[in-house]
Image (tube, grey):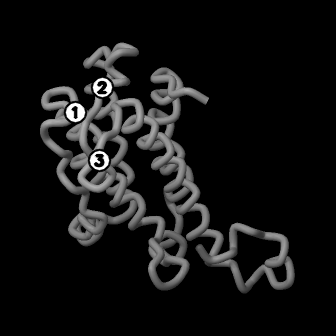
Amino acid sequence: MRFDLDHALAVLSRTPSLVRTLVADLPAEWTERDEGAETWSAKEVVAHLVFGERTDWIPRLRILLRDGEARPFDPFDQRGHASLMREHDVAGLVELFARERAESLDTLRAVRLTAADLERRGTHPTFGPVTLGNLLATWVVHDLNHIGQICRAECHQYRDAVGPWVAFLGILDRP
């Protein structure tokens, strides 16, 4: 499927409400526990999403539109959300994410991108040349990936409790 900005906006605008539905009012045992080593809890995923709103998608869009391939994007700190984790509970992170996402989408809509803009190229610090369409499509898939990650982290809390049904619940396979 080719990238379609309207479709992307439809997904990106729904992510905060999906995240809220998945984590709101759950006990900390569900939102602050992960799947094991090298995995994230639901709370950590939400903090990461907030950090991404601040430092990834719109900042990279601006660099690409202003500088093209001449200036690489700033590297993204995969652990840059640590202070957000310490400073906010999961409910606070969800609300912060919703506000920051709304601002990001307002900015994206205000740019009034054309089909030609989606073909404009920038430079990723690891991958090299990418298009604006690549960046925006990645934003959508990144959201969906992390929604799945929240579901996996929460499902893992009952991994042992499901007993033999674990064989039929692929989501309980560790990543």
Name the residue nearer the viewer: 69 or 141.
69
Give the image location of residue 10, x and y in percent: 51, 28
Residue type, mark 2 in image: Arg
User: Residue 128 bears which disc, if any?
Assistant: 3
Q: In the picture provided, is 174 more to the left or to the right than 125? A: right
Q: Are there few (<14), some (14-19), or many (20+) residues within 10 Å of tag 3?
A: few
Mark 3 or mark 1: which is in front?
3
Give the image location of residue 166, x and y in percent: 79, 78
Name the residue nearer the viewer: 117 or 148.
117
Task: Tell me where residue 30 sits by quadrant.
Answer: bottom right
Q: In the picture provided, is 80 more to the left or to the right than 20? A: left
Q: Report the quarter where the N terminus lies.
A: top right
Question: Under tag 1, what secondary structure?
Answer: helix
Residue under the image location 60 percent in, 61 percent down: 151
Residue type, mark 1 in image: Leu
Q: Are there few (<14), some (14-19), or many (20+) residues within 10 Å of tag 2?
A: some
Q: Are marks 1 and 2 in contact (CB under 8 Å)?
A: yes
User: Residue 64 bears which disc, if any?
Assistant: 1
User: Residue 40 bears which disc, if any?
Assistant: none
Residue type, mark 3 in image: Gly
Name the residue nearer the viewer: 73 or 148.
73
User: Residue 120 bears which disc, if any?
Assistant: 2
Question: Under tag 2, what secondary structure?
Answer: loop
